[in-house]
Amino acid sequence: MSLERLSDKAVEMPASPIRKLQTFSDDAKSRGIGVFHLNIGQPDIHTPHFIFEAMHNWESKVLSYGPSNGIFELRKAFCDYLERFKFNILPSQVIVTQGGSEAIVFAMQSICNPGEEIIVFEPFYTNYLGFSKMADVKLVPVETFVDDGFRIPTEKIISEKITSATRGIIICSPNNPTGTVYTEDEMSRIAFLAKKHDLFVLSDEVYREFVFDGRKHVGIFAFEEIADRAVVMDSVSKRFSMCGARIGFLATKNPRLADAFLRFSQARLCPATVEQIGSLAGFENYDKFIPDMIDEYEKRRNVVFDAIRTIEGVFTLKPEGAFYCVVKLPVSDADEFCKFMLTDFSLDGQTTMLAPANGFYATKGKGKDEVRIAYVLEQERLKAAIHILGKGIEAFNSR
């Protein structure tokens, strides 16, 4: 056996389009160029002080293994939090995971045998591709389009992708990367198809409260007729601006599925304890932090959208939620453009880093002229970053 040989899974694991240009960003910084990071959903809003205080004040003589499904107090706090949205679920139906990432992998592994399929609406959160490789699952894309705000297509279009190998549908609302918030009608369409075709629905609801312009989030638990088919995947990362804590949640009312989640959790022993203490403090102080944070993101959304509309040839619709938008650019290749912005362009010593959107598609060739923008910077910095983006497009196209 050659030491050069790796597994197919290792070879096929995709690079992150969010991070793959990092070396070019590092090089730009080494040359003294300031980089506005609109490529990654890392909020600059400070993690609330009460979260750090809770972790700092937690005392134990031994930092021992915790329960595989997470400490009871945090699971109970998550259930109480869901009650705000009229969702009734028990602590026994919740698993605390190492971030929303582990929640998604556990969910995929629990509903699919190797080679089976999950329907996904593209563009989608790029790490779904990596998670599907880990779980030996095939993602089957259903395309949505920037022109109509990436709305969920008709039942007929979705049904054409469903085969005997299909085990579920994965959705994300508010959506990363598009900022689309699915309506009750769209969610009802998903619930109907799940029941009709005997499928699970894996609902990524990490951005649940990130909805703007008076909209309401519609979660999958609102559809009691598919209670036994519904799985919610969640995380504190963006909600409490604590991405590094890596605390997420899996929730289902299906007892067999809940038991499978527990056994997967036992195999990795337990989630991190101290970060669970911090997350608990976040839920206990929810109203002190969340309303102002959502208001700030809505203002940032407005700043970015208004600035983008001033750039000739650029198209996007106003994001409805989360803190992302997919933007169609007047460039031949968004990959090359994003690299160009870091290697060959700056304005007054600054440049803007974006995520090429082709990595958010499973269909080859899609998203070639699109980028994802994460509006996670202060408003004035966002204005500067989008101004630089416009000048960069002019320079790229005049080469």
Image (spheres, rainbow, N blue to C red):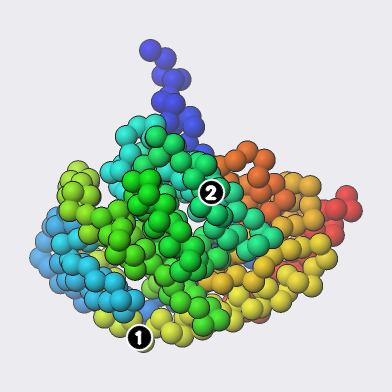
Q: Position of residue 133 (x, y in %)?
A: 42, 37
Label 1, residues with CA under 10 Å away: few <14, some 14-19, many ≥20: few
Q: Which residue is mark 1?
A: 287
Is residue 127 something one can see in this rendering? yes
Q: Amino acid at mark 1?
A: Asp
Q: Where residue 136 appears, x then y in whole percent?
A: 38, 35
- Please name the amino acid that badge 2 sits on: Lys
* Image-based side of 143 in relation to 46, left or right: right
Left or right: where 371 falls relative to 44: right
Q: Residue at (64%, 71%) from the top-left corner?
A: 318
Rendered image quadrant of residue 353: bottom right
Q: Nearer the viewer, residue 191 or 364?
A: 191
Question: Considering depth in this image, is 378 or 207 the residue closer to the camera?
Answer: 207
Residue that badge 2 annotates:
156
Instruction: Give me the residue at 85% from left, 53% from top.
Output: 397
| Secondary structure found at label 1 | helix
